[in-house]
Image (cartoon, coloured by chain):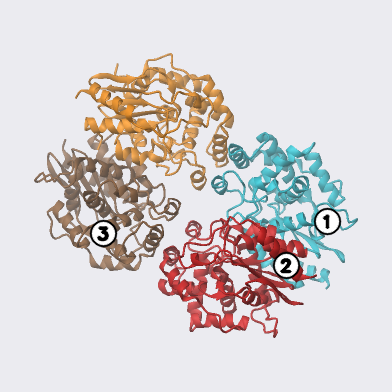
Chain colours: A cyan, B red, C brown, D orange
């Protein structure tokens, strides 16, 4: 299969695609991004790298960081982790407090904000230097030691974090947060502020396509069983209230962020990242969704 | 891989497994079933049939029929179908009216009761003899012309269908039901009352594992693209409010019914059915969930 | 106090009041009404009748009938009635199924549709000829034997009653409806289709202002204690999700209907009715709310 | 009417009344109270003071303070106040976040926690020394300058205020809180920690029974119109999710607190306070509810 040709075709289609999406504006710093940025990077187990556009330019990974945080937490803890956060799709917009209250402070899954805040709380209790260790983990799986946060985004998000503070306080009231609220919030926002390029994200997500191992040197980062479970959670919970739609149209486990990035993996085949900042009404990159649907259609491959 | 040996081991484990589940009792006729019934049937694309227990005994397929109804509807209609029913996980118990009201009469997916009632309404509008045609479809994909409904279960369910009538009236108020409410309800209950054995269900679901084709003669029942989409919906919505858990532990698309049956498929590999009537608190066969988790663990295979 | 002068002032103000309200359109027959109809009738215990506009013209009383139904049911049953329907404000739009499901089929109060349907079910079980007896009760408290239903409205509402059928089926599923759903629905719609004038409604509601007795001949229709309780329910639940606002601005127990009528009473003082078909977004007569606020302001009297 | 005789009878009945209630335990300091404390104080406009039990002993007024805060805010601001907090009953437990989220950060009424937090925010913006000025206001309406907070309760509540912090953060996210969250929370808890006796509460609430004026010297504390409105809000919203029940059984405006106090007023007649710490499942004093129902039954007087 000629992957580069397929990517070229997708690129051509994207330029003619009308987008009605809007860039994320709830944080002023994110709203400054050029809405026409576009990049895609496909990293295949058997045949290496394919790409187009600004696939090397770093952007705010935002919620994509939740996958790394979950992976790190699962590598440190056993199944006890899932007493504090469930693995069910939320069936509600990504930041709703309603379900959290009905379910007594136990978030539906680790990829909604509430769940990721619990994971952050767990990492703070488990790690010596949470921020440094988290960044090191990303350096380890990407071999890109220059990856770091965007401090402007970090500061900007801290100023607009009342809703996440509400979620944290509610979970603390239910006894599901151990550490100080400000500490958890600070670490959570730190993770969201990390910047990576499409290429770097595809390299990082290769471990989920490659049975938990880095492709380059076969280092086992996370066990095969845990890799499968993370992929399963991405499949059912990776796209806010559009997880079913993504599964239906694309058929791959993946994760999106409000920075406009989407990463998806095909087990045993590839990891792929696309970046386009305009979001659809459910908060996922509009062109990103389209590009990935075209990829599985044109390759004829999906996990189903 | 010696599949029969794996099934034997699962059978042994099931006999020692303590079950705290309860059989479905909301319909008197269903409550009469022997709670200790146990059967499993695995149908592999490459190597044929493996089984244990009463894999040949028919039981009430209940909600498993929703997969057949969706398949038939998708074979008759294009994407317009999904204007009347969404494909998102429900994140709520299987018969809740709450979400339906918030979402203006559009059910979350075709595998909750509300969604299946819309599918029934569509089939009534599309088919000449809905009941006969539906049964014929099952005869066609199983080559088992003796499959039919249990009339006692059919009558019993009709007497306890007020909640489904509520759901239908609400959707009719929102303009999402075309036919008479009694007609739709009658046809829906008819589908639920069909009885099939583990073996027959595995044969029927082989089309989802085999790219939409019957294995025995390669007849294309439904297109490859639609097959993948049905599998995706099973993956994200097949287990009421336990879809994430099933995906997390088992990692296969599947569908359960309150009669105690669960069918799952592994694309390109197999279809498998287990029957054990005791249900866990979320309405899925307790031992069935366990058996399928063991199957993917012991075979080392899942879609992730 | 010169009540007629006060009414005249209110009438003048109403003619200059800009109304952004809309007449009820969910039933075609109701949508035919002239939106500019306007009438008010004040019936004082000590000084008799005051009025302006078309206070003698009959209109569809709709939900105002719920007060008569509750009164009749309370006269037949003791406190057991309140095991089947609560007396709490609903805090939700008047026809929501959400709360009903959370509260296991027990409606919040007798003035939301669900509660009135339970009251209808009770009356059917208690009365020999529900429709005739209900009409007789209204004839008795008004001395107006010509009051009857509008058959066009009755038929029209029967065609658009899916939501109420949904509510009934849901309550039947919870075991809170004894009679056939169609029978209950038919009787409920019958009550809503009754037509009365402002004058007739003020005469009927005089019993609530006059300690349960008809003013004209002191007949005790309902006990003093039950009268107070009905008034209390009107105070907290008489205006859908605007009961607090009405209490805050007007300060009297009352009941509105989507036909554009509002009746309110001041214990020991008067009963008053206003009719103006345009409804505000919460379903209450827009000018009616204004007129009653002016009445209590200009008289300087409220229960608080 | 011999009020003392009526109070004596109520006292006798209370001693034989079996209570299944429980004292508030969500704050350790409140849980220390003797559950058998019992006091009642009736302050009549025409005939002065009647009482029994420990009517002179101070207890934690808790949510009763919300009435004073609303009064002070209404005396400082016009109707703009009600753009930031509604006046509708909540129809939900007193601390639910659900409704707040659906209604975009506008609390249902000033007597649920969310609403009282908004009122606190308003007072902080309006007053020079919020705590001192608030206490002064209570001193002014009671002529009891020794009334102050219980510092142990204050500290204890500050340690268990995560849920209120969640509510505040959520409202801040919606733009409905102006001041620092910690400042608002601190002032809110300060108000709740005030201690008053039954006698002092009856004296304070006399202004609501006496058209906004102190009885002793006719000082107008709040206008007649605003007094009526506060009474209306007490009527529809004063008892969490039991406002309808209280209105139905007692028929007076009132306010309860989790410290076990209930104050009610009869316009033009009296203010009455009862204290008994055991709460019913809805959070209101169990014997308090009973005593007030008996009071209106034995006097034959209610606003209805």
Where is residue B243? Give x, y as percent: 62, 60
Chain for mark 3? Answer: C
**Quadrant placement of the N terminus of chain D:** top left
- Name the front one of labels 3 and 1: 3
Do discs 1 and 2 share a chain?
A: no
Residue at the (76%, 66%) spot, across then down:
A11
The residue pinned by badge 1 equals A203
Query: Vertically, is A303 above or below C37?
Result: below
Residue at the (60%, 48%) spot, across then down:
A95
Which quadrant of the structure image shows residue A267?
Answer: bottom right
- C210 and D76: which one is in front? C210
Residue at the (52%, 38%) spot, across then down:
D176
Report the Cα–Cα distance between label 2 and label 3: 60 Å
Judging from the image, what secondary structure is the residue with disc 2 in?
helix
**Quadrant placement of the C terminus of chain D:** top left
- Name the front one of labels 1 and 2: 2
Residue B8: image tag: 2
The residue pinned by badge 3 equals C125
Do discs 3 and 1 share a chain?
A: no
Judging from the image, what secondary structure is the residue with disc 3 in?
helix
Judging from the image, what secondary structure is the residue with disc 1 in?
helix
> With B34 as the anchor, is A192 left or right in this view?
right
């Amino acid at each position: 299969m000629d992957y580069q040709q397929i990517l070229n075709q997708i690129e051509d289609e994207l330029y003619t695609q009308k987008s009605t999406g809007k860039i994320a504006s709830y944080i002023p710093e994110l709203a400054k991004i050029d809405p026409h940025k576009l990049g895609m990077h496909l990293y295949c187990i058997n045949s290496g790298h394919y790409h187009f556009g600004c696939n090397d330019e770093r952007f705010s990974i935002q919620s994509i960081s939740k996958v790394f945080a979950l992976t790190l937490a699962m590598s440190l803890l056993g199944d006890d982790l899932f007493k504090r956060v469930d693995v069910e799709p939320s069936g509600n917009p990504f930041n709703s407090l309603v379900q959290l209250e009905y379910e007594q402070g136990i978030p539906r899954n680790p990829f909604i904000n509430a769940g990721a805040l619990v994971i952050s709380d767990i990492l703070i209790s488990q790690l010596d230097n949470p921020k440094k260790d988290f960044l090191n983990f990303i350096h380890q799986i990407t071999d890109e030691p220059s990856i770091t946060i965007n401090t402007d985004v970090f500061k900007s998000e801290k100023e607009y974090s009342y809703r996440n503070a509400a979620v944290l306080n509610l979970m603390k009231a239910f006894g599901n947060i151990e550490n100080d609220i400000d500490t958890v919030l600070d670490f959570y926002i730190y993770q969201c502020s990390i910047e990576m390029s499409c290429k770097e994200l595809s390299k990082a997500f290769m471990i989920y396509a490659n049975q938990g191992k880095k492709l380059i040197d076969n280092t086992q980062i996370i066990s095969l069983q845990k890799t499968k479970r993370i992929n399963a959670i991405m499949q059912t919970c990776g796209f806010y209230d559009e997880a079913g739609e993504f599964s239906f149209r694309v058929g791959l486990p993946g994760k999106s962020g409000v920075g406009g990035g989407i990463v998806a993996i095909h087990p045993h085949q590839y990891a792929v990242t696309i970046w386009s900042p305009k979001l659809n009404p459910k908060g996922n990159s509009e062109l990103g969704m389209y590009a990935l649907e075209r990829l599985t259609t044109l390759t004829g491959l999906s996990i189903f």
